[in-house]
Amino acid sequence: MFKEEYITLEVPKSGDIRKTLSPLTYYSEILDKTIKVPLYMLTDLGSIPQVLQGIFPKDGKAMFAYILHDCLYQSGILTRKQSDDVLEEAMNTLGVTWWRRKSVREGLRVGGFIAWNNYRKGITG
């Protein structure tokens, strides 16, 4: 469950990367742990192909979960599977439909390794 109701993001005039300007805190029941997204963390919200953003909007119900997931991938504090599990759990707490949660999860199984591996190598953006 997310503690905050709102988050403030710095949004550039162009480009897709935002910066967190306010706290975001999530308690994961599956981990029995609180996760804090750091201030000034960079996020693309969700790495969703442009063609699918009408079905899976980056700034929709799942936005907090996407930011949390970016934090988990960037930090590497959990395994990739745990990070993906927490994303799915967070999306559920936000009321994202089961078919959207499962579709996002499947998309991560197919392509999430690229971002995960890039962060492990120190490659960002």
Image: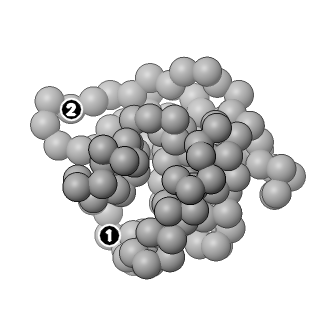
Q: Amino acid at mark 2?
A: Pro
Describe the element under mark 1 as helix, strand or loop.
loop
Q: Residue furthest left?
A: 14
Check disc 1 and report the residue beneath it.
Answer: 123
Q: Earlier in the sequence, mark 1 or mark 2?
A: 2
Q: Is residue 15 above or below residue 23?
A: below
- The type of colouring in the image is one colour
**80, above or below 63, in the image:** below
Q: Which mark is residue 27?
A: none
The percent position of residue 68, horizontal first and vertical second, equals: 56, 47
Q: Is residue 48 visible?
A: yes
Q: Determine the residue positioned at 13% across, 37% down.
A: 14
Look at the picture and state if 83 lies above or below 66: below
- Identify the element where label 2 is drawn: loop
- Towards the viewer: 100 or 37: 100
Q: Judge whether 23 appears above or below 79 on screen.
A: above
Rendering coords of residue 54 (x, y %): 30, 44
